[in-house]
Image (cartoon, grey):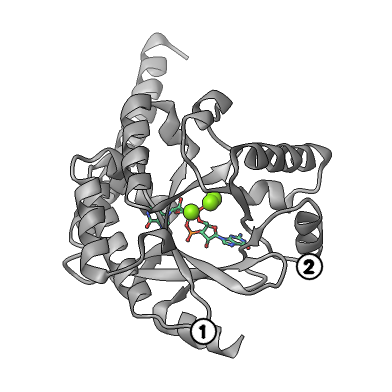
Amino acid sequence: LTMYDQKRKVRGSVGVFDEELHEKIKIEQQMHEDLRHAIGNGELCVYYQPILCAVDKKVTSVEALLRWDRNGTRVSPVIFIPLAERIGLMPEIGTWVLNRACIDASQWSFPQPVSLSVNVSINQLLGGDFIHSLKQVLDSTKLTPSSLSLEITESVFAKNETVVANQLQAIKQLGVKISIDDFGTGYSSLHRLQSMPCDFIKIDRSFVQNTDEGSGTIVRATMLIAQEFGCKTIAEGIETHEQVERLTGLGVDYLQGFLYSKPMCANDFITWYNEN
Ligand code: C2E
Ligand code: MG
Ligand code: MG
Ligand code: MG
């Protein structure tokens, strides 16, 4: 190859790369645009997944999980929530979820009380009017504060430690509970945990589903931590009876997973509850 050929070859591949990148950016920007209009277009809805008491297998709560039907095609929250977070839409979308879920839950009347658990993103939590909108929704729906829990991932502890701690204190003062989601997978610090008022620790699906020695050790350590801090534990991603045996054997308090039910729309959840 001559110098000229080499240069041309490099340039040529840069050209292809440019095109691909350009296409990718275009697709992403289209998704941004669509997401901005998702609320207004009525494309968002909240699904509910039951959480059961490990002892008697009765439903004690549900986790609210956001769904987006983008022009009729469902997009996974794993994809669009980080995107919404990046483009600054999460406070607005999160507030919508909180309102929708609290309205739904306030209309339920089951023989046993069913609590509600709602995921809250870091930018939503740190948004200036989070506590205000939380108060407002409790007010307007008359939901008992202690029947609401907010799920926060460990990653929120990675930054803004003081601000996060203040927000969590304010949440606790309203009587609302706090769950740490995906425990063990993220930026964990026992020191920080100590200053966090948490009611539930959610053991991540990966530790529930993997049966290797390491996962077992992490679950046992988590149980000790929860006991020390006076929190209850929830095992996520239960799909088999073996997992039920294993996790209840380790002392987990609550179970959540496809074995019991996938997340369902509000109406299907009511039907499911009445049939179970
Ligand atoms: P997450 O909060 O850890 O929610 C649990 C996820 O595990 C849900 O996925 C649920 O459908 C799934 N899951 C539950 N049981 C099983 C099981 O037995 N097997 C398997 N394979 N999966 C199971 P989903 O609904 O796709 O949500 C993914 C993540 O998106 C959530 O993880 C949460 O981080 C985020 N997310 C969903 N809705 C919201 C929301 O309203 N606000 C915020 N900030 N994040 C949300
Ligand atoms: Mg969650
Ligand atoms: Mg989780
Ligand atoms: Mg998870």
Depth check: 35 or 262 in front?
A: 262
92 with respect to 194 (left or right): left
242 with respect to 13 (left or right): right
131 with respect to 46 (left or right): left
Give the distance between the C-alpha atoms of the residues marked 1 and 2, in whole angstroms.
26 Å
Q: Can you say whether 17 is above or below 40 in the image?
A: above
Q: Position of residue 266 (x, y in %)?
A: 40, 78
Q: Secondary structure at mark 1?
A: loop
Name which residue type carries label 2: His
Q: Position of residue 190 (x, y in %)?
A: 58, 27
**In front of the other: label 1 or label 2?**
1
Name which residue type carries label 1: Pro
Please give the residue where the numbered disc 1 appears in the rendered image. 111
Q: Crowding near pointer 1: few (<14 within 10 Å), some, many (20+)?
A: few
Residue 241, numbered label: 2
Q: Secondary structure at mark 2?
A: helix
Mark 2 CB in 8 Å range of ligand 1?
no
Q: Can you say whether 46 is above or below 237 in the image?
A: below
Q: Crowding near pointer 2: few (<14 within 10 Å), some, many (20+)?
A: few
Q: Residue at x 51, y 84 (%)?
A: 111
